[in-house]
Amino acid sequence: MNHVTAALRTAKARLVVIGNGMAGMRTVEEILNRAPDKYDITVFGAEPRVNYNRIMLSPLLSGEKDFDEIVINSPEWYTENNIHLYSGDPVIKIDRDRKVVISKSGTETEYDQLLLATGSDPIIIPVPGHKLDGVVTFRDVDDVDTMLGAAAKGGPAVVIGGGLLGLEAAVGLQSRGMDVTVLHLAGHVMERQLDPSAGYLLAQELERRGITVITEADTAEIVGSEHVTGVRLKDGRMIPADLVVMAVGIRPNGRLAADAGVAVERGIVVDDVMTTSDPAIFAVGECVQHRGQCYGLVAPLFEMAKSLADHMAEIETDGYTGSVTSTKLKVTGVDVFSAGDFSGGGETEEIVFRDAGRGVYKRIVLEDGKIKGAVLYGDTSDGGWYFQLMKDGEDVTELRDTLAFGQAFAAGSSGNPLDAVAALPDDAEICGCNGVCKGSIVAAISEKSLTTLDEVKGHTKASASCGSCSGLVENLLAATLGGDYQAATVKPICTCTDHDHDSVRRLIIAKNLKSMPAVMQELEWKSSDGCHVCRPALNYYLLAAWPGEYVDHGASRFINERVHANIQKDGTYSVIPRMWGGLTNPRELRAIADVADKFEIPTVKVTGGQRIDLLGVKKEDLPAVWADLNAAGMVSGHAYGKSLRTVKSCVGQEWCRFGTQMSMGMAVELEKMTWGSWMPHKFKMAVSGCPRNCAEATIKDFGVVATDGGWDLHVGGNGGIHVRATDLLCKVTSDDEVKEYCGAFIQLYREEARYLERTAPWIERVGLKHVQERVVDDEANRKALFERFMISQKTAQIDPWAERASEGVDAHEFTPLSMVAAE
Amino acid sequence: MSNTLTWVEVGPAANIPQQGARTLQTETDRIAIFRTLDDQIFALLDRCPHKQGPLAQGIVHGHFVTCPLHNMVFSLETGETQGPDDGCAAKVECQVIDGIVRVGLTELQAGLRHAG
């Protein structure tokens, strides 16, 4: 940890921040932007980790994100900015007289200025049984871990609270395979954000996904002796549960402040520059009460952070004047938006638009010609526009007739998103979470020569939180840069989808998707049946995710894999029988020679992988060629596939006078263990019997080189267009270890690499250290990987030739149609 | 020589795999007959205009096929290449009547010759 010198300490004011969450760290970032050298900063956080994006807990639960992706500031960020972080060490007392905070571990830290960003606590209804095991809140990463632990066992779950957070928890748990019931006290879900109609549509959608929603459900008791077993309602109904999530609301956390004698009502009372009743103490975020309001959304926190940073950097500021908020539900495939007051009645008028077929509902509430509130369900693309009109107090009387059709219609535009974004005024808010307007994004793009979404995120924070505005930000990039703009760094698999490879892999598992139509439906594919780019990738991801269960989809395989031979430039095929470890015998050689004669195969060649290639076989002859080769005991060489191809060997200790280990034996064992396994790309192995490395193992995906004491294991080699020598993974001593490490490495590659990514670019992307941590350092993980590999191998080692040669599988591939005269 | 087509039956549409194809050898050409996911039947000459790739061996998606040799994408409806590539695969007339696929062949393809 970084310690600042005493000399510097005296030069700078000491700022202590209590709370390592989104509000506190945003304030620190804003201060660093304005006055990087003004404060010597110390941060105390209760959670034992760096700060992360709490609003992304739902995607973390559903599996759409992992923790690394929701981290806001890395440990390096704290170091680089000379911030002393005490994580996992909450402050337990503020001594205002001595200007000192005391942490749980006993550390005393002096401050000149103190910032409270203690956030809020989840409300726990004190019904009987609320302290049982298995009752959790949905507030931090530990809660998510508890929920994931329960979900891994399956079974029933009850979510108490049908608000934003409760529904996100319910959908997350349901996608993790639990049987979920939502209990909600009010008459319809999300009643603070939605009117009854939109609430009804949302409940219907949840029911369609298999979630039970019970409204007007008043919880009497949580039942169980040690661990929860169910929830009983006041009307006597009993709902079984292995997990109960309480998501009924939050309460500002003002305990520390109150104990120290700072004014606290519902929250810590602050003025417009976020100063508490003690002028040396500030407060921001969910813990505060400003002009009588407490906020539980992220946008206001960030507005507060800016006002406070201005104040602390001694920049003139209007201060914080309160926030108008809007909400979105972060559930994939459910679009819900609400803003302002939509209760209606009084002098208000309503514009309602319904399209039952599309499941679209829009309701806009007007008062004196201005938008007072809006609820959108099913189509929320105009939410930002309504919100802006509302915040600006714009008179929409002239737009009234077409208001429900949205911005594109109002502007009479072609529906081109670039036109729409170009037409927005500079003060139009693009990123609601971070309160970033169009003008500042465009200015940052031009002044700092930004060209990617990530750069815009980094410099402006736009789309750095929930990410729902990233499309708009990209449009702004395109509109500002014109032809210079290269779209997103994360590339979708193909034009059929917006998802990249990694998120598709994760969602297949998280949402339990087991067929190609299920993937395309749930992940909103834009084409009816994909294309030649995404279908082979999806087929592989499904095979890898559900071994033994997913049925291979031949029509989604490249021709080589579909017919188990290599197509050549003239449309004929080449056939390469497997020769285990590169070994053969006279009987096999005779059979190969006979086949070449019988089917008039023009070319017989030895390959680089020590196998014999029969080139120029007519497609119709393939089954007969295979039948003859099968009869001589040979199986398919998979020389065509994104799969284990060959294991090359030298003659090793069996014959070589320098050999230190049995390389031929090891090569045969490795090939027998690994053949038939489908991979993201072709996979080659080699075993050399001594460090002279005659089998050239150091340009293979997995290379084994014998030494006096055992084996060196190499990974990530590639003899392709860009030759890459292997990295040394580790050294092992026994033959069994070679096999275990080999299987574990392959499985890691199978589970993590993108389709058509060979081990060389994969390792360069993720780093050798990542692979070593999982395969070498973590024994339990290695054994688990190896076990998963062997489980998927149980159903993988079927010779595709035999099925086709003798059982008539895919016979249509090899027999042409015949003509019958019709006229 | 006239442009009259000779219609020949090649069997039930169900004999062609969904999102797949089968071939038909005529006197002069090999024809690829495709069946899409929405059960429509299309036919092209079984060679791409680029390097004579056997289109019947490609991946069928939507109303398109991707050539197995170099991944050029052709419309099954028109034979036109998609995207930046140039070229057009030769379209062959076909129809489905009562579930039976019929292909319209030219006289040369059908092996008929006019006297003189």
Image: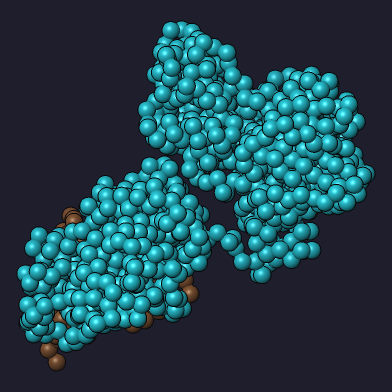
Relative image position of residue A684 (x, y in whole percent): 32, 70
Q: Closer to the camera, A162 or A471?
A: A162
- Report the coloring of the rendering: by chain
Left or right: A81 in relation to A681: right
| The furthest residue to the front | A709
- Seen in the picture, residue A793 relative to A521 is either above or below; the reply is below
| The furthest residue to the top | A235
State the hue of chain A: cyan
The image quarter in which residue A649 lies: bottom left
Residue found 79% across the figure and 24% down from its top: A257
Question: What number of labels is visible?
Answer: 0
Relative image position of residue A754 (x, y in whole percent): 43, 60
- Seen in the picture, residue A461 relative to B77 is either above or below; the reply is above
The image quarter in which residue A402 lies: top right
Left or right: A89 in relation to A318: left
Q: Closer to the camera, A277 or A200?
A: A277
Left or right: B38 in relation to A345: left
Residue found 27% across the figure and 77% down from its top: A659
Residue found 71% across the figure and 63% down from its top: A450
Which quarter of the rendering shows the C terminus of chain A? bottom left
| The furthest residue to the bottom | B116
Q: From this viewpoint, is residue B19 visible?
A: no
Relative image position of residue A329 (x, y in whole percent): 58, 36
Relative image position of residue A408 (x, y in whole percent): 65, 49
Chain ID for brown: B
Q: Closer to the camera, A209 or A370?
A: A209
Q: From this viewpoint, is residue A89 visible?
A: yes
The image quarter in which residue B37 lies: bottom left
Residue found 74% across the figure and 22% down from its top: A255
Left or right: A458 in relation to A517: right
Q: Closer to the camera, A743 or A238?
A: A743
